[in-house]
Amino acid sequence: MEIAVSQIDLLITHAGQLLTCASDGPKRGDAMRDVGAMEDGAVAVKDGVILDVGENEALEARYDARVTLNAQGHVVMPGFVDAHTHVVYAGDRVAEFEMRIQGATYMEIMVAGGGIVSTMRAVREADVDQLVAETRQRLDAMLALGTTTVEVKTGYGLSVEAELKLLEAIARLDQSHPATLVPTFLGAHAVPPEFAGRADAYIDLVVGAMIPAAAAWYARSHFARQGTPFFCDAFCEAGVFDAAQSRRVLEAGKVHGMLPKLHADEFENLGGVSLAVALGAVSVDHLDVTPDAEIERLAASDTVGVVIPAVNFNLGSCHFADARKLIDAGAALALATDINPGSAPCPSLPMVMAIATRYQRLLPAEALNAATINAAYAVGLGEEVGSLQPGKRADILILNVRDYRHLAYAFGANPVATVIKAGAVVSP
Ligand code: NIG
Ligand code: FE
């Protein structure tokens, strides 16, 4: 009997381990240990979208592909989603790295006028072309390491004009780089020097001028046309913005259609998790010093908790967010790099998995789900990316290992052999 063979663009064959990470919502609890693994699998792609996922033999019989990629027994998995980054900036902070080695703390450097404000100076001096050129190199590195979707925050401009410049750079990079970018407005990242000692007056500017300007920018942008969400975030931290100031920012963002996110509990607990949950935030990020009662509150909510262990590692700290407790309590947990010039100059989600498995006691499977499907939900794209499921965008990695646990077991080398974005090979 003749079997009808259908024409497709791409068939990835002979995946020794095919990991789907499939889920209809962010994974919680025991589901985090399930990466949806299948032996000798294949993935069929048409028009940039996953058409079918299943056993190799069945898919080879069913489809006639224009291009076939033989994974030769290696792992095939969804592209990574980096749920928290500050990847658009100018310059570096390598001098502060040496200051920290000699004993200064991250917050001491920030209070002394370095830190975020020193990158602000470099960003204010740069034009959009320079921001795009410097950031493109970092996005290339992230793509080669398997990251196909990247949340990107502003927050190094800290004036209406410079924040809009960062948003413009994000839009240009999204349109010219293979990675998918998701924009977040973070005007409330630090108090700029012209508002020193007047944080409330700066929040007045964020709420009264920056958020309306950012919302108008988004409405004109290709992001709005294609339905990419737009987030609003604030750095809720002792010495930066308190919970009341953060609330003003996120509420104003909501009025303008921006979805809330929050930096909370990185150094001190100011009740940021409760605030984020109360505002219906899509994610609340860092969670290094979140007390048990707020872990329970997060676990009972739809807000995704994003932990960022590359920051603790980079700051030479042995204290990490209690990601184990977050998963065991039932919270939806995601991992991110936080790539930025100060607290985490790290493009690599495999490296973040390596840290999370050792210092946060996640199993490799939990770290993998946290950096794919749950990270996709943390950026509002859980229905489009983050897993290998029919109908999702064909963002797919072929690794150079045969067992996905090697992603976290080994570290320092790149485990990604081939990156496929919307059905096309984009790296190497
Ligand atoms: O997530 N915490 C605030 N923002 C970044 C650091 C940015 C910087 O140091 O430039 C973070 O760690
Ligand atoms: Fe951050």
Image (tube, grey):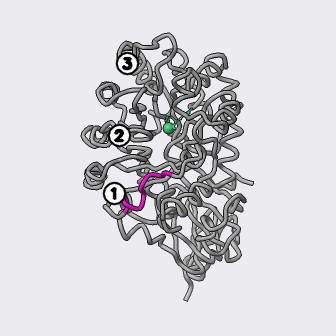
Task: Return the disc, 3 or 2, that comes first in the chain's sequence.
Answer: 3
Q: Amino acid at mark 3?
A: Ile
**Helix, strand or loop under label 1:** loop
Tell me which label, 1 or 2, sits earlier in the chain.
2
Q: CA distance from mark 1 to mark 3?
A: 31 Å
According to the image, label 2 marks what residue? 269
Q: Please provide the residue range marked out in magenta.
A: 319-327
Depth check: give the residue in front, 280 or 39. 280
Tell which residue pokes out farthest to the bottom in this image. Answer: 1
Label pair 3/2, CB-CB below 8 angstroms? no
Q: In the displayed structure, does residue 43 sit left or right of residue 25? A: right
Figure disc tally? 3
Query: Which of the image's four quarters has the C terminus?
Result: bottom right
Residue position marked by numbered label 3 in the rendering: 203
Q: Is residue 13 above or below residue 142?
A: below
- For the residue labelled by badge 3, is the local secondary structure a helix, a strand or a loop? helix
Crowding near the residue tagged with mark 1, few <14, some 14–19, many ≥20 C-alpha atoms within 10 Å: many
Residue drawn 40% across the image and 64% down it: 23
Q: CA distance from mark 1 to mark 2?
A: 18 Å
Q: Which amino acid lies under the numbered mark 2 shown in the image of this protein? A: Asn
